[in-house]
Image (spheres, helix red, strand yellow):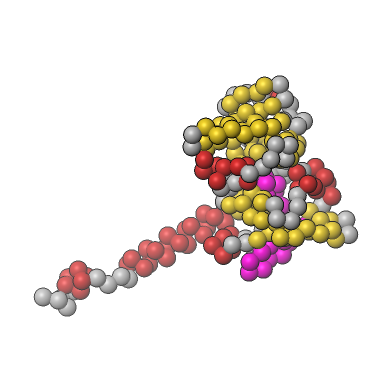
Amino acid sequence: MFTGLVETVGRMAGREAAGRAGKLRIQAGNLPVGELRNGDSLAVNGVCLTLEQVAGNVLEFHTLAETLKRSNLGGLAVGHPVNLERALRLGDRLGGHLVSGHIDAPAPILDIRRTEDDWVVTLSLPAPQAALVVEKGSVALDGISLTVASLAADRFTIRIIPHTWEATALSEARVGDLVNVEYDLVGKYLLRQREVANLARSAAGAVSLTTLAESGFLS
């Protein structure tokens, strides 16, 4: 688990295909690489990855095809900035919100503008995911814990303070870029619970030839 509080900005150092998977190499930025161990979990642009090897200041990860498909990591060029965060330790302060590192989908940035001291970023919101976003609720963008400022049918807006803008890879984002989105974990479980309950009610109320025969309507 993670908090969505980015520790440092690294850089894409390389990516290689390996069958249905790949190898991802990330320049570690200011992470204390001497404290890292093979097998550690790190969030790279919000994607939970397992560290395989440390070579100098470069981190190497094994990535599944599913990971590259469902995130922006498969399309970032060498040198592109990425947000890095080590896994949450029990007893640490939870300054952001609970972030699992499991990306729901990448979303394109529709607009970026400056409003006084803050930055306002608008992202696309596909209809199937609309129920997962609430105004003033939490969302993780490229691994950054943020609060939804406003919400429309097909988009939502985030306001970003100067410190977060300057201390993360968002400072180099452009309109059209894909951002990894992880919706609030609690909201996803609540939505799934409602879906299962609706399915159960539908099944209980379904009428079939078998139920008609058992009720004596068919001979």
- Note whether residue 96 is visible: no
**Residue situated in front as seen by the camera: 165 or 98:** 165
Residue 200 inside the magenta-drawn segment: no
- Where does the image place residue 171, in percent across and percent down from the top left? 79, 47
- Where does the image place residue 204, in percent across and percent down from the top left? 32, 67
Residue 149 inside the magenta-drawn segment: yes
- The kind of secondary structure the magenta stretch mainly shows is strand
- Where does the image place residue 115, in percent across and percent down from the top left? 85, 61
Image quadrant occupied by the N terminus: top right
Give the vertical position of 38 relative to 181 (above or below).
Answer: above
Q: Which residue is drawn at 88% across and 56% down?
A: 117
Q: Which residue is drawn at 74% across and 56% down?
A: 175
Q: Which residue is drawn at 84% across and 58% down?
A: 114
User: Farthest residue toward the left?
Assistant: 219
- Note whether residue 16 is visible: yes
Give the vertical position of 169 relative to 124 (above or below).
Answer: above
Which portion, as a residue range, is magenta? 141-159
